[in-house]
Image (cartoon, rainbow, N blue to C red):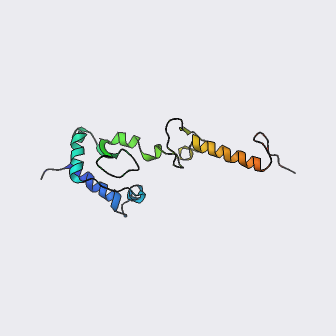
């Protein structure tokens, strides 16, 4: 029997979505992502995307929060897939980095980066706190001795 690489990918997808003991389950099945793609559909994608000519083909979900469906999947190079991972598209609070909502660097490293929406909400929260204390945003707090 000839080796069919799309079959191995199909088993890997099932493991990601259904095997709670698998180390990466929390990123797939644990997030509610399900497998609705058949082995035959995966073969069609393999041929359509010319995966046999790729160095390291990997299955990619176009909508990162969507299920494994024929319409939502494609084969791309592993190196490209690694560059478009989920954590790079969303800020830690779940806002999408797109358009004007790009992330702002912080001195605390990439895990603590904030998007413009988060920064604006944080500034507004700070201003509201000052107002409730009877101060304006240009006031300075002085230690009372």
Q: Residue furthest bottom?
A: 21
Q: Residue furthest front?
A: 71
Residue located at (79% from left, 45% from top)? 135
Residue 27 image offset from top left, x and y in percent = 41, 55
Residue 75 image offset from top left, x and y in percent = 29, 43
Compared to residue 70, the image places residue 23 above or below, namely below
Q: Tell me the quarter of the picture where residue 53 sits.
A: top left
The front one of 128 and 75 is 128
Residue located at (63% from left, 45% from top)? 121
Left or right: residue 101 compared with residue 5: right
Q: Tell me the quarter of the picture where residue 105 sits.
A: top right
Residue 110 image offset from top left, x and y in percent = 53, 44
The front one of 131 and 110 is 131
Number of residue marks: 0
Q: Residue furthest top?
A: 100
Left or right: residue 54 compared with residue 91: left
Left or right: residue 99 compared with residue 46: right
Residue 109 image offset from top left, x and y in percent = 56, 44
Residue located at (51% from left, 49% from top)? 94
Left or right: residue 73 compared with residue 137: left
Q: Residue furthest left?
A: 1
């Amino acid at each position: 029997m000839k080796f069919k690489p799309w079959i191995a990918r199909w088993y890997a997808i099932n493991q990601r979505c259904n095997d709670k003991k698998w180390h990466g389950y929390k990123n797939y099945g644990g997030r509610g992502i399900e497998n609705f793609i058949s082995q035959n559909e995966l073969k069609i994608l393999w041929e359509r995307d010319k995966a046999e000519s790729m160095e390291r083909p990997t299955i990619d979900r176009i909508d990162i929060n969507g299920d494994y469906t024929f319409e939502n999947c494609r084969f791309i190079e592993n190196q490209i897939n690694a560059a478009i991972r989920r954590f790079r598209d969303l800020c830690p609070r779940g806002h999408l980095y797109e358009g004007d909502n790009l992330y702002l660097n912080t001195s605390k490293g990439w895990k603590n980066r904030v998007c413009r929406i988060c920064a604006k909400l944080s500034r507004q929260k700070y201003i509201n706190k000052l107002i409730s204390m009877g101060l304006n945003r240009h006031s300075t707090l002085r230690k009372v001795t």
